Amino acid sequence: MRTLKKNMLLRLVNSYIVDSPEPANISYLWNFGSLLGVCLVLQILTGIFLAMHYQPHVDFAFNSVEHIMRDVNNGWAIRYTHANVASFFFIFVYIHIARGLYYGSYKSPRVLLWSIGVIILVVMMATGFLGYVLPYGQMSLWGATVITNLLSAIPVFGQDLVELIWGGFSVNNATLNRFFSLHYLLPFLLAALVVAHLIALHTHGSNNPNGIGSSTDRLTMHPYFTFKDLVTIFLFFLILSIFVFYYPNMLGHSDNYIPANPMQTPASIVPEWYLLPFYAILRSIPNKLLGVIAMFGSLFILLILPITDVSRVRGNQFRPAMKLFFWFFVVNFFILMWIGSQHPTSPYVEIGQISTAFYFLWFILIVPVLGLSENTIMDVATEK
Amino acid sequence: MRPTVARMSDMPGPKVYNLWWGDRGIAAQKGVIQYAISPNRQRAAKNMFRNWLFNGYRRLAAQVPYFVVPFAVGYGTYTWAKSYDAWQNSKAAHEAGHAAEH
C-alpha cells in the first residue's frame, strides 16, 4: 500500500479512485459519471478496430461498412456495439446533466466543473454527428448536408465557410475524409476534457442529494463506490447486450442502409434521436440565422445557470416548487425530442415554438424568479 | 505513511470545499475506533429485497406529486396533437374545408 500512496503516478490513482473521500449519501444518480467513462473507453476501443477495416472514400465507405458487417471476424458485433453505445452515451449524459440540474451541482464552487461538462457535451454532439456521416448512407449524406449548411446562415462569409468545410461545392469525398479524421481525433480531445472534468471535480468533491457540505460524513471511493459503480456498469452491459444482439438497429434510421445518393433526397431528413430536441429548436424559428443561434444557444445557455440560479438552497431536494418546474423542463425536453422527429406542419410547428420558448424561459426567468421568491419568503419568515 | 505524503500530492487541502481525510473540520482521526461484529454474525443483506421494494416505493411515491402533472400535460399535448394531425389528414377535415398544409 505504501507504493500506491508514494509512487508519483500511483498516488494519483489512489487519490482519485481508492482513497478519495466521497459523500456517504450519494445515490445511484451519481453512478452516471463512471458509466460515461466506460462508454468513452468502449467507443474508442471499438472505434479503433472499426477504423482498421473502414475506407473513408465515397465509393467504398458504404461497402466497407457492409464488409465489416459480413466478412470481418465479429465485425458485426464491433460495429453494432459502437453504434448502440453512442446512443447509450447520450442517454447517460442527459441523465448526468439532469442530476446536475436537479441537485444544483452547477452552483459555486463547482462552476468550472459544470462549464467543462458543457464543453464536453458540445464536443460529444460534434463527434456523434461526424460519426453518423461515415457509413455514407442516405441519412449520412443528407444529414451532413443539412447540418453543414447551417453555417451558411452566418452573414458575409457563411457560404465560403461551408465550402471550406466541404472542401468543394457539396458534401463530397474530401468532406468524408476530413470527417473521418476529425471523428478519430475528437474522442481523444474528449478524453483530455474528461481528465480536466475530473481534476475540477476533485478540487471540491462530489455534490450530494442534500446540497450541503458533506465533510463530516465520507466514505472512501474504494471499496464502497467502486463496487456500487460496478452494479450499474454490469446492468449497462446487460441492457447493451440486449440491444446489440436482439435490436441492433432499433435506435438507428433504416434509410442509412441505402447508399448515399446525391441525386435523391430522402422523404424526411431526421438526425439521430439524441440531436432531435436541438433540431426542433432550430426549426421552430423561421429565420435561419436566428434558428442556428437558438440551437447553439440552447446548449450554451447551460453555462448561465450558476448566475441565474440565485437560490440560497443548493438543489431541489427541499424546494417543492422547483421540483415541479424541473419535471416540466424534463417533459418539455421530451416534447422537443418528439417534435424534432415530426414533419414541420401544424400543430407540430406551434407546439415546437411554445416548447422552445419554455426551454429558454426556464433558464432565464423561471429559475431566477423562483429562487428570488423563495429567498424573499425565507427572509420574511425569519425576520425578527 | 506519513501524513505529509498525502498532503503534498494532488489532494484537496483545508482551504477547499472538499476536505481530505484528517483535515480540520472533519472528524479527528486520532482515537477513531472501528467496531465490527464477526462476519458470521453479520447480516449485510438483511431485508434487502423488502427494503428495495417498500422503501423504494415510499421514496418514489413521495415524488409522484411533482412529476405527475408535468407528464400528464406532456402526454395530453402528445395525444391531442396526434389526433388533430390525423383529423387534419382525414376526409372529414377536407370536407369541412380544413386540411393540413403540405
Image (spheres, helix red, strand yellow):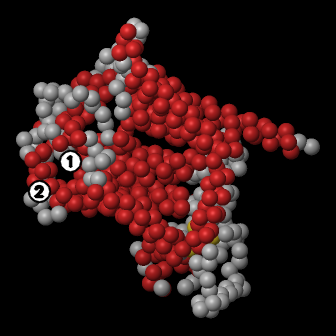
For the residue pair A58 and A78, the one nearer the viewer reads as A78
Residue at 64% from the left image edge and 57% from the top image edge: B59
Please give the chain letter of the residue carrying mark 1: A
Compare residues A218 and A266 and report the one nearer the observer.
A266
Disc 1 from disc 2: Cα separation: 24 Å
In the image: residue A246, left or right of residue A222: left
Q: Please tell me whether residue A177 is drawn above or below residue A340 in the rendered image.
A: below
Whether residue A106 is visible, yes or no, is no
Q: Position of residue A288 (x, y in %)?
A: 36, 21
In which quadrant of the rendered image does the C terminus of chain A lie? top right
**Few, some or many residues within 10 Å of mark 1 (<14, 14–19, 20+):** few
Using the image as rendered, state which of residue A355 and residue A123 is in the foreground.
A355
Q: Quadrant of residue B5?
A: bottom right
Above or below, comparing residue A192 to residue A374 in the picture: below
Pointer 1 residue: A181
Residue type (three-letter) at the residue carrying disc 1: Ser
Q: Amino acid at mark 2?
A: Arg
Look at 70% across and 83% down and name the residue there.
B32
Q: Chain of mark 2?
A: A
Q: What secondary structure is found at the residue carrying circle 1?
A: helix
Task: Determine which residue is flagged by label 2.
Answer: A70
Asked whether, in this view, residue A294 is left or right of residue A29, the answer is left
Disc sitting over residue B85 in the figure: none
Instruction: Assign a secondary structure to mark 2.
Output: helix
- Mark 1 / mark 2, whichever is N-terminal: 2
Q: Position of residue A297 (x, y in %)?
A: 45, 32
Residue at position x 67%, y 69% from top?
A217
Please identify, in this view, whether the residue under mark 1 or under mark 2 is nearer the observer: 2
